[in-house]
Amino acid sequence: MAETITNSPILFALATGLLPTLFWLYFWLRIDRDRPEPFGLLFLCFIVGAASVFFATTLQKTVGGFFASDTTTRVAVFAGIEEVLKLLVFAFIAAKSDYNDEPLDPAIYLITVALGFAALENIFYVMQPSVHSSVTAGLLTGGFRFFGSTLLHTIASSFVGIFIALSPRGFRGLGAILGLGGAIFLHTAFNFFILKNDTASFLQIYGYLWVAAIISLLILEKLRRLPPQSTALKPV
């Protein structure tokens, strides 16, 4: 079985890119174990989140030429495109759902969208010719993305969900925008440090990311203990 997977680029990419992402999804959904969200709605968020990769790639290719000489701006714009699309998926699919009725729910749905996005992105990275030609390279790419990029997408989206949950009911749209700004900043900083391509920057940003992950996890645990209340993005 293992030999079949490693000999098939598609199966290898699916195993290396998808399975670790599903592990993260299981981990974060466990926070909501007391009052879990419906599987169908979570599945839809995951699938549409994955599909948004195609829109992100198209938009990035379209605007990339305008910032060819300005790497910092291009990195920020690309990060912004991805974070805005993830928020839009949540807004159209789950934000106004009757199931989005607890403080923790926005973050759970946004994390699910983010992991769908990360899953397909990971698969594409592993399927690159320079990667899938070597099992070791594929495993290293999957491993780095498991501890880095996949977690980044999760934390950035959870940041938006936390801001929504902590905003007064009449200002949750504003909370979403503020959270989006923080998510774009985090995403941009991560990509900028990675582009430096040196060990010190690599370790530094990974350290910051894991600190952010721990803080997010603690806040989500606090939100889990709050009493149910409507958190849908609707005017009051």
Image: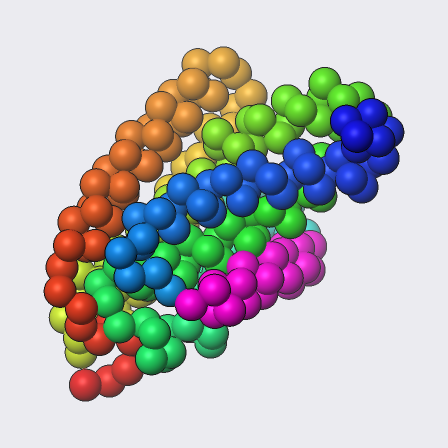
Q: What residue is drawn where x is 36% and y is 23%?
A: 207
Q: Position of residue 201 (x, y in %)?
A: 44, 20
Q: Position of residue 103 (x, y in %)?
A: 22, 63
The verdict on residue 47 being magenta is yes
Q: What residue is drawn where x is 64% and y is 49%?
A: 120
Q: Position of residue 63 (x, y in %)?
A: 63, 58
The verdict on residue 84 being magenta is no
The quarter of the rendered structure image containing the N terminus is top right
Q: Position of residue 116 (x, y in %)?
A: 55, 54
Residue 197 is left or right of residue 183, and the answer is right
User: Residue 105, can we see it?
Assistant: yes
- Magenta stretch: dominant secondary structure: helix
The outermost residue toward the top is 199
The quarter of the rendered structure image containing the C terminus is bottom left
User: Residue 74, can we see it?
Assistant: no
Q: What residue is drawn where x is 72% and y is 21%?
A: 137
Which quadrant holds residue 32?
A: bottom left
The front one of 119 and 62 is 119
Stretch of the chain drawn in magenta: 38-63
Q: What residue is drawn where x is 19% and y is 54%?
A: 223
Residue 33 is left or right of residue 14, and the answer is left
Residue 57 vertical position relative to residue 150 in the rendered view, above or below: below
The outermost residue toward the bottom is 236
